[in-house]
Amino acid sequence: MKLCMIGTGYVGLVSGVCFSDLGNDVICVDKDIKKIDLLKKGKIPIYEPGLSELVLKNFKNERLTFSSDLKNSVKKSDIIFICVGTPTKKGSSSADLSQVYNVAKELSLSLNKFKIIITKSTVPVTTGDEIEKILLKKNSKKKFAVLSNPEFLREGEAIRDFIYPDRIVVGSNDKKSNKILKNLYTPLISKGAQYLHTSRRSAELIKYASNSFLATKITFINELANLCEKTAINIEDISIGMGLDKRIGSRFLRAGPAYGGSCFPKDTKAIISTADKFKTNLSVIKSVVKSNKNRSDILLRRVYEILKNKIKNKKITFLGVTFKANTDDMRDSSSLTMIPKLSKKGAFIKYFDPTGYKKEFENIKNVSYEGSIKKALKGSDLVIVHTEWNDFKSINFKSLVKGKKFIIYDLRNIYSSTKIKSQGFKYFSVGR
C-alpha cells in the first residue's frame, strides 16, 4: 500500500519505518527541511534502539522516502497518517491541536482522489469530527474518510511494540476504510495482535484512558513506597504480592521517580481538560497528576535527609538523567526538577547519561556532563542512580573508584542493599 506519514517525530518516523519494513511504500513528510535532509543521509534525530538500521535498510530498498513536499506526497498516497505533535497548550492543561488542524487545512487542498486520513497523534475526543469539518469546507464527503488509529509505542521498545502489539485499535465509522486498515495490519494480526474496531471517538478516548490508568499505577506504587519507608516494609514485596493478582498485574508497579516522557504528563492533563469541557469530574486522574507533580520534591527531601541538610559544596553525581532508559527523551524527567534545585542550594553536580550531553542543563550553575561513569563518580559525596540504564546495573563501585566511600541513593532499586553495603558504601533506595 502507498502510505504518507505527516510528521517525522517519534510516532511518525517509527511507524513509517516499520510500515515500510512490512512491504509498504512509505513517504515520511516534514516541513523541517534540515531534518528531512539529515534523514536522507541516514542520520536519525531521535534515540531509539534498532531504528537506524531499519531506516537504512528500507531507504536503500526504496520502500522508504523522505520529503518536505506535503501536497505532492499526499497525491501519491492512498492512506495519510497525521503524526504531528500535540503538546500541552501554554498556560493551559488542554492539548495544543494547532499542528493537527494546520495539517488538515493543507490536506483539504491536496485531495486528488479518495484518501483515508488517520490521526495517529494522540488527540482528544471529537478531534476527528473537527478534522472532518475542515476537509468538508473544500471537498465532498466521497473524497475522504477520517479514522483514528492511536499508537501504543513505548520509548526504547517502540520497534518491538509496533511489530508485536498487544492490540491494534482502529476507530472508523466507514466500513470500506476499516477493511483497508485491517488488510494493512494483516501481517501483525497474523502474529497474534488483537484487532479492535470501534467508533472514531472511542479510539480517541482509548489512548488517553490507557495512559491515564498506567500513570495511576505508577503514582499509586510511589505513594505506597512512601508509606513503606516509614513502616520498615520492602515495597518490592508489596509489588510482587499485588502483581500476582491477574486483575492487577505487575507491570508499572515499580516505585521510583515521577513518570515523565512524551505521553503520560500531557495525556493525563488533556483528558482532565476534555472532561472539564464536558462537565465531568475525573477526580482520580486529577489526584494522580497532583501526586506526580509532588514526587520529585519528595525525593529531594530524602536527598536533604541523607546529606543531613548540608548541601552547599557537596559533590553530587547523577547516573542517567532521561526520564527512563533506552531513550534520549528529557521531557518531564525528574532530573529537570532535582538538579536545578540542588544547584540552587550550592551543590556541584556532575552527570553521565549514555545518550550524552543535555542542553537542558547548560545554563544551570555548577552542572557538568562527564563522558564516562568513572569520571562522573570521581570525587562524589553522593551518587543518585536516576535512570535504569543497563550500563549501571553491574557497576562495581568499589573497584571503579578506589578509596572513596560515597553515599548511593538508588531511585530505581536496581542494587542489592546487602551487596552494596558489604562493599563499604552507605546505601539508600526507594520504599525499602
Image (cartoon, rainbow, N blue to C red):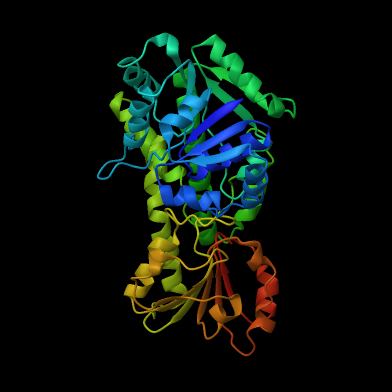
Q: Specify the quadrant that holds the C terminus.
A: bottom right
- Of 278 and 2, nearer the camera is 2
Please give left or right for residue 115 compared with residue 109 in the image: right
Q: Is residue 384 above or below residue 241?
A: below
In the rendered image, is residue 209 in sight? no
Residue reaching furthest to the right: 191
Q: Quadrant of the N terminus?
A: top right
What residue is rendered at 53% in x and 22% in y?
78
Instruction: Indicate the position of residue 241 as horizontal and vertical percent values.
Output: 67, 45
Q: Position of residue 23 (x, y in %)?
A: 68, 32
As displayed, is residue 379 above or below residue 350? Answer: below
Identify which residue is drawn at 48% across, 19% down.
Answer: 115
Residue lying at 40% horizontally and 22% vertically, measured from the top left: 128
Give x and y (percent) for residue 79.
53, 24
Question: Residue at left 61%, top 80%?
Answer: 425
Describe residue 71's horizontal placement relative to residue 214 as left or right: left
Q: Is residue 79 left or right of residue 281?
A: right
Is residue 310 something that shows in the picture? yes
Front-lying residue, 203 or 227 = 203
361 relative to 24, above or below: below
Above or below — where is 254 with respect to 230?
A: above
- Using the rendered view, name the quadrant where residue 312 is placed: bottom left
Give coordinates of residue 132: x percent, y percent.
37, 18
